[in-house]
Amino acid sequence: MSDEQVHEFETKQFIVFSLGDERFGIDSLKITTIDRMKAITRVPKTPNFVKGVINLRGDIIPVMDLRAKFNLPPTEETEETRIIILKLEEISIGVVVDQVLQTIQLTSDSIESASTLINSADSDYILGIGKVDGEIVTLLNFEKLVKL
């Protein structure tokens, strides 16, 4: 990640969520809503990380399973399972997460470049690594993640 990319953060707000024991963050400006888990309609012949689609207030939204995308083992849905609806350019997409934990603000000096920790080919969809209360939070770039 170049210095230019890190400085564009200045101070940004992220929504932190969990997948198992791992913590991830999404730029809060990309999020339109966070909803409880709802019925997902499977779509044939889609990649394994596409759970299907939901009807959200009359809009059909594709839903991605981040556990499958990140090769994490599947888990049972709980009361804490959420669908985060993101607006990426002109499309909306939902992502299933185990639990939404908190909202945080990070400054550029509190964000490590992902390329120092991870192979650059694998870090395209990672904006950086932040620390919150001693825990590592992987900050995701969903525009790049959905194109992988």
Image: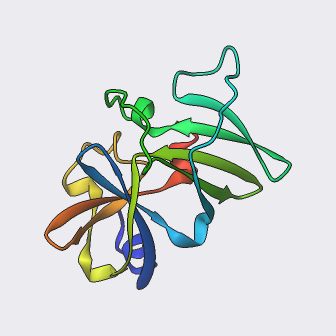
Q: Position of residue 66 (x, y in %)?
A: 45, 39
Q: What x and y, as percent, mark residue 79? A: 44, 48
The quarter of the image holding the N terminus is bottom left
Q: Nearer the viewer, residue 78 or 32?
A: 78
Residue 34 lies left or right of residue 136; in this view the side is right
**Numbered circles on residues, count:** 0
Q: Residue at x 33, y 80 (%)?
A: 108
Q: Residue 107: x percent and y percent?
A: 34, 83
Viewer-proximal residue, 85 or 75?
75
Image point (53%, 52%), residue name: 142
Residue with the most extreme front position: 79
Q: Is residue 27 above or below residue 123?
A: below
Instruction: List the single residue furthest toward the right.
Output: 58
Quarter-wise, where is residue 101 in the image?
bottom left
Q: Residue at x 42, y 42 (%)?
A: 78
The outermost residue toward the top is 45
User: Residue 60 appears at what percent x and percent y?
Assistant: 79, 42
Residue 34 is left or right of residue 99, and the answer is: right
Q: Residue 3 or 127: which is nearer the viewer?
A: 127
Point 62% across, 55% down: residue: 85
Above or below for 117 versus 5 = above
- Give the answer, above or below, for where 89 lies relative to 9: above
Q: Give the colour scheme shown.
A: rainbow
